[in-house]
Image: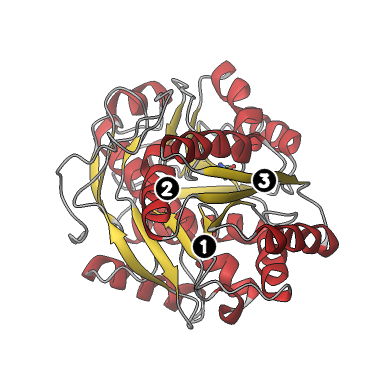
């Protein structure tokens, strides 16, 4: 075997370690490192080790674009994992397509996107917004206040949530977008407005460091999460660790993974993670997608014997794996992933008590124009659990 045949396979890693979304992206990066180390310890890809090449785009969309081009052109990387905010994913896709590279994107997002060169491993609205609307509207009421960060993902999420609320004859009391870099005063102002309007619940798609401000402001104005919870798609264990469990307690999130999932594989992966990165480390839904997508990628690379994006794009669709959330599968047709929707309510320890979960996996429906609570689709499939080697 020549040296080249034994050469490491480079994977670009594009998660921010600075800027507004650094905490959640660093969680995704640690998951990527953990999975790569597991793959390498098990012999790599047909004997070749994975080598991760990191860049820090500082949570700024056009830096993701510049840096992914550097990774592809200068570092000769053909596969990149990364991006959290949809604005950052949208910034890199033209470059990924122009170079016929492959991006694996491990974050829930708004749907309405397909790229031949992207595999999406986070939830689409039918896998998180629809179950959340169903749970909130039947348990809390239908007078809703919507608050999000000022960019594409919250706009689209609120459009979908509005349809679901109106379908149930509900009322939208307000829809507010807060700049990504806004400070405490902006959140306090919104919380005062919410307290005056007394909605049944708040729907939040605030991301990044603003999450902590929002929940603190909510507490500051004296609202009770057990009466008027914030229902979110973006508040995970990692943001709760930053804001403090006492501030998060009682609030609700829809996600396809929670750290609290009680399965042998989840317990094992968390133990490995905490041994590697420290025993106070949290996991979260973006962490989990970043983790399992590396194992899916490794399976595809082992089958194809290469990091050629064309070969991988022929192999990844239809591939399945036991992930910490349960068995997941890349859809053959739309490049998105069959996942396990859940609703969690935060407890005193900063963990989610799972109050509702789908019976099996739910295929992604990224192109559904009009979502409805009437046809929320759950196809029977493997439930959570399972064990990888
Ligand atoms: C997101 O912007 N997809 C969280």
**SS state under label 2:** helix
Q: Residue drawn 82% across and 57% down?
A: 186
Near-viewer residue (330 or 52): 330
Residue sitting farthest toward the top: 98
Mark 3 / mark 1, whichever is N-terminal: 3
**Where 235 falls versus 163 (above or below)?**
below
- Quadrant of the snapshot with the C terminus: bottom left
Q: Residue drawn 76% across and 63% down?
A: 192
Mark 3 / mark 2, whichever is N-terminal: 2
User: Which mark, by number, is residue 236?
Assistant: 1
**Where 311 falls versus 388 (above or below)?**
above
From the viewer's perspective, tell me whether residue 302 is left or right of residue 183. left
Q: CA distance from mark 2 to mark 1?
A: 18 Å
Q: Position of residue 7 (x, y in %)?
A: 45, 42
Q: Residue drawn 62% across and 29% down?
A: 90
Near-viewer residue (388 or 368): 368
The reply to whether the residue tagged 2 has its Cβ within 8 angstroms of ligand 1 is: no
**Where 135 falls versus 265 (above or below)?**
above
Q: CA distance from mark 3 to mark 2?
A: 16 Å
From the viewer's perspective, tell me whether residue 177 is left or right of residue 329. right
Could you tell me if residue 256 is visible in this image? Answer: no
Mark 2 / mark 1, whichever is N-terminal: 2
Pointer 3 residue: 174
Q: Residue drawn 57% across and 33% down?
A: 156
Quarter containing ligand 1? Answer: top right
User: Which mark, by number, is residue 133?
Assistant: 2
């Amino acid at each position: 075997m020549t040296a080249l045949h034994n050469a490491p396979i480079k994977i670009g890693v594009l998660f921010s370690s600075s800027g507004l979304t650094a905490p959640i992206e660093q969680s995704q990066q640690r998951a990527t490192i953990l999975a790569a180390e597991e793959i390498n310890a098990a012999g790599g890809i047909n004997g070749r080790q994975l080598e991760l090449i990191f860049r820090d785009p500082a949570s700024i969309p056009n830096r993701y674009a510049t840096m992914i081009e550097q990774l592809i052109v200068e570092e000769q990387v053909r596969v990149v994992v990364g991006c959290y905010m949809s604005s950052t994913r949208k910034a890199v896709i033209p470059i990924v397509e122009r170079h016929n590279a492959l991006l694996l994107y491990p974050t829930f997002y708004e749907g309405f996107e397909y790229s031949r060169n992207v595999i999406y491993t986070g939830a689409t609205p039918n896998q998180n917004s629809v179950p959340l609307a169903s749970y909130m509207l039947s348990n809390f009421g239908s007078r809703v206040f919507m608050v999000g960060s000022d960019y594409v993902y919250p706009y689209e999420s609120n459009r979908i949530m509005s349809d679901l609320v109106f379908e149930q004859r509900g009322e939208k009391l307000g829809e507010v977008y807060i700049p990504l870099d806004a400070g405490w005063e902006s959140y306090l102002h919104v919380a005062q407005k919410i307290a005056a309007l007394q909605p049944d619940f708040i729907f939040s798609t605030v991301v990044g460091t603003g999450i902590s401000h929002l929940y603190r402001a909510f507490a500051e104005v004296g609202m009770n999460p057990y009466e008027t919870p914030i229902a979110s798609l973006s508040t995970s264990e990692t943001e709760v660790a930053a804001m403090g469990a006492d501030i998060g307690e009682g609030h609700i999130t829809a996600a396809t993974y929670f750290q609290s999932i009680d399965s042998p594989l989840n317990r094992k992966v968390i133990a490995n993670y905490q041994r590697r990165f420290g025993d106070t480390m949290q996991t979260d839904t973006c962490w989990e997608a970043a983790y399992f997508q590396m194992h899916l990628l490794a399976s595809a690379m082992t089958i194809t014997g290469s990091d050629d994006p064309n070969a991988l794009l022929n192999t990844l669709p239809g591939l399945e794996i036991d992930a910490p959330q349960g068995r997941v599968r890349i859809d053959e047709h739309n490049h998105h992933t069959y996942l396990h929707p859940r609703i969690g309510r935060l407890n005193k320890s900063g963990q989610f008590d799972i109050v509702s979960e789908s019976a099996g996996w739910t295929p992604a429906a990224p192109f559904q124009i009009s979502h409805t609570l009437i046809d929320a689709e759950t196809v029977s499939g493997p439930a959570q659990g399972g064990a990888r080697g």
